[in-house]
Amino acid sequence: MQFRLATLLLLIGTHIIVAQSQEPSVTDSIVSQELDEVIVTATRTARQLSSLPLPVTLVGKKQIIKSGTVRLNEILNEQTGIITVTDESGFQGVQIQGIASDYILILIDGVPLVGRSAGNFDLSRLTVGNIKQIEVVKGPSSSLYGSEALGGVINIITEKPEKQDFSGNASYRIGSFSQQDMNLDLKQGFKKFRYGFFANRFSSNGYDLNEDAEGQTVNPYTNYTLNGRLYYDINDKLSLFTSGRFYDQVQDAGFTVDSIQYEGDTKEREWNAHARLDHKLTPALNMAYELYYTNYVATELLADPISTDVLSDSDFDQKLLRPEVRGSYTFNIENENRTGFQNGTLTAGAGLQLDELDRTYFEEKVNFTSQYLYAQYDFDPLEKLNVIAGARFDNHSEYNNQFSPKLALRYQLNPNLAIKGSVGYGFKAPDFRQLYFDFTNSAVGYTVLGYNVALDKLQELEEQDQILDVVVTEDELSQPLEAESSIGYNLGLTLKHGIGNTEINFFRNDFKNLIDTRIIARKTNGQNVFSYMNFDEIYTTGFEINSAYKLTDNLNISAGYQLLYTFDKQRRQDVKNDQVFVRDAITGQSVALATSDYFGLVNRSRHNANFKFYYDIPSAKTHVNLRVLYRSKYAQYDTNGNGLIDNFDTSFIDGFVTLNAAVSKIFYTDFTLQVGANNLLDYTDNNIPTMPGIQAFIKLNYQF
């Protein structure tokens, strides 16, 4: 049933491609507009989306507004092949091509955001109120962006004031669970000076999915986002951009232990400061001098309000400073051979990154330093062939040097059909937690040690007579922890037709040296000591198809589907060798697991699909849209103790459909009233804390 539904959505879209006649595309449609959009993340230079040889998803401002979404995780969850996943901390990250959120780099205006206390970057921290577009590059992107871009890059591009006069908008939205979203966006331009100011307040009373359990599933919270941007054209060759961003959130917290209700709150605060000087040295050479600083702080305090006994008191304080210089040189600029692109562009850059983290459960404040160089050549060796070749070198204080190459090609077979492919290397450096964690659970008694401190801490525990035996050799803990790495392959087709376009992309990502926990010692209290090791090798493979069409002047539809397989290579071989067992439910005996019963990795669905319907009614100044999302079953953890996810595990969440809709109407030219609801089918599951049932909303926007 799961595969049939996903296939049905795909066939609907494919049938429309074949059935429609070849008509000129309409420039104001979502379909044709996205083809012509300029994207910068994939190459660090402005390139038209339709000409790129890489798998890229672009989400424009019109799509964001019409959908009625207010946070980044909501709009990304509606894109093909991008799945939001919640980690143990409750943060929502994304999977791309089956690659976990830990390996996806998050940028805002081209610079990285920090604050991954448990691996995921919490996308709900980011409002979409002042976003111009979202650019998603799928697959390894370390050749340009280094660590954390092993699985892809998400770049949030904020709006830039262009007009000479004063403009802006103000909006208020209220929805289920007393969720409120308020925006104020101001922009103004002068002859050489432009500025933009944005403010957002977002709050919710939270909700409870399980009345039998004490406390709420999500507690009440309020957050604020402020962002100011200044642009100054010094002269014809020099221009300055500066930006400052502030985020603050406070959320109620509560936890019950032994009938004692502990209360408190969690707080998050983030600062970003970004300055860039763009210098046009010659018509062919452009330079950029950039300085970026960010600081993310998270604290949690839980205490008994009566006895004042503290249950949890934790701090997370991360700082990042990054200066970078980059240049872009265009060869033979006077001889353009196709619109918007010259014979070749060489992009190169160098930078320094200083990363610092002060965290509870670290013995002391720790620091990383790294230096990097990258270069990329984007050229057309043949009239119909575009090639992008690039590489990056990273020198890091805590792991071996990394060299990250990438090659991408696109060949225009005819005016309507192009083939493209890419291969690239990606890596992710061991993070602070994997190197320096020092945590002992006081209630249970187990210990988790970062790799760099494991030897010293084991000796301390042995001196305290807490260790029964050590199960690894000293040599195993003496060699540097390797960076995780992958090689990613993408091969696709792009088809343009009179009413729209279709893209197909086949992908495979092979990972090695993945870092996970393992037992390194046994304690005298019966518990274990864990640390981090390189040992896993996995792969993700499958394909995606996206189709979008303009059926009439006012009707646009699109459909997308992803087929995904993800496996641990060693565990799959063990299954083939009849070395993995499962208990037979009837006989009670252990039997070898069949290859077909090995399902794959945790939190990965085999099928994902979407169907979107956009309809304008010009006479009524009204827009209607409907978005249908489907995710097939997936498992949250191994329940039968054989170390993998198989069809006999009981932690599976069944496949489900989500239906989102919104209707917008313009009044008096400047006012827009929007009414909508997410999850109209009222799907809930106690194991999915981010889906509390129907979420209705009403929004009023004033454009001035």
Image (tube, grey):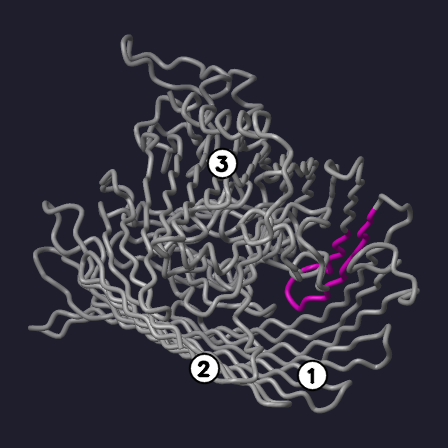
Q: Quadrant of residue 610?
A: top left
Above or below 140: residue 155? below
Distance from Cα at disc 2 to Cα at disc 1:
20 Å
Q: Position of residue 17 (x, y in %)?
A: 58, 30
Above or below 624: residue 308? below
- The reply, left or right, for residue 500 in relation to residue 86 is right
Q: Residue 401 magenta-drawn?
A: yes
Three-letter amino acid code at the position of disc 3: Ala
* Residues packed near mark 3 inside 10 Å, few (<14), some (14 to 19) or many (20 plus): many
Q: Residue at x 57, y 80 (%)?
A: 274
Three-letter amino acid code at the position of disc 2: Phe
Q: Residue at x 37, y 77 (%)?
A: 184
Above or below 419: residue 439? below
Quadrant (top left/top right/bottom left/bottom right) for the N terminus: top left
Q: Give the label on residue 197, or none.
A: 2
Distance from Cα at disc 1 to Cα at disc 3:
41 Å
Circle 1 residue? 277
Q: Position of residue 230 (x, y in %)?
A: 56, 85
- The reply, left or right, for residue 219 in relation to residue 261 is right
Contact (Cβ within 8 Å) of mark 2 with mark 1:
no
Q: Is residue 285 visible?
A: yes
- The reply, left or right, for residue 523 in relation to residue 571 is left
* Closer to viewer: mark 2 or mark 1: 2
Residue span colored magenta: 386-405
Q: Give the label on residue 559, or none.
A: 3
Magenta span: predominant SS is: strand
Mark toward the start of the polypeptide (3 vs 2): 2
Three-letter amino acid code at the position of disc 1: Leu
